[in-house]
């Protein structure tokens, strides 16, 4: 009975965590999606999946984050809570093609 009660109490927080998780794919030296909308005032989990065989560096001056993601691997980046606004990011190794923005609204 305690396990069921614990699971019922924990379920809402688990669902909430999944709601604030976003995937960002790197393929052909481009980010997909190029625009991610997130809620204001919430911490988010960004899972960056690099499907290219070469590394890429996720970089954002406005988010104060940089992380190298090896080829054919993934990395988790936590950001926020964010104020309302646009937060640009780019691939340090392919700046001309790897670009995107997180919009907090």
Image (tube, rainbow, N blue to C red):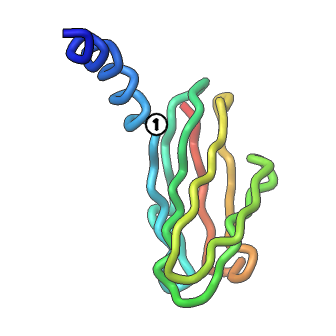
Within-10-Å neighbours for mark 1: few <14, some 14–19, many 20+: some
Q: Image point 54% across, 44% down: which residue?
A: 45
Q: Judge from the rendering whether residue 72 lies leftward or rightward of residue 5; answer left or right.
A: right
Can you identify the residue that label 1 sits on? 20
Query: Residue 15 sits in which quadrant?
Result: top left
Q: Image point 64% across, 82% down: which residue?
A: 55
Q: How many marks?
A: 1
Q: Is residue 78 above or below residue 88?
A: above
Q: Position of residue 82 (x, y in %)?
A: 66, 32
Image quarter (top left, top right, bottom left or bottom right) of the N terminus: top left
Image quarter (top left, top right, bottom left or bottom right) of the C terminus: top right
Q: Position of residue 86 (x, y in %)?
A: 65, 44
Q: Position of residue 75 (x, y in %)?
A: 57, 62
Q: Image point 73% across, 81% down: which residue?
A: 93
Q: Image point 39% across, 35% down: which residue?
A: 19
**Along the line of sight, which residue is nearer the eye, 70 or 31?**
70
Q: Position of residue 102 (x, y in %)?
A: 58, 48
Q: Residue at the far bottom: name it.
A: 53
Q: Is residue 56 above or below residue 22?
A: below
**Along the line of sight, which residue is nearer the eye, 102 or 11?**
11
């Amino acid at each position: 009975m305690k396990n069921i009660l614990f699971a019922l109490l924990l379920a809402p927080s688990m669902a909430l965590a999944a709601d604030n998780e976003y995937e960002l794919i790197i393929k052909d030296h481009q980010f997909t999606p190029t625009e991610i909308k997130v809620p204001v005032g919430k911490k988010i989990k960004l899972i960056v999946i690099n499907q290219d065989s070469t590394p890429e560096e996720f970089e954002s001056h406005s988010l104060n984050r940089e992380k190298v993601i090896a080829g054919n691997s993934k990395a988790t980046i936590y950001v926020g809570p964010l104020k309302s606004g646009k937060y640009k990011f780019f691939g340090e190794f392919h700046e001309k093609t790897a670009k995107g923005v997180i919009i907090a609204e």
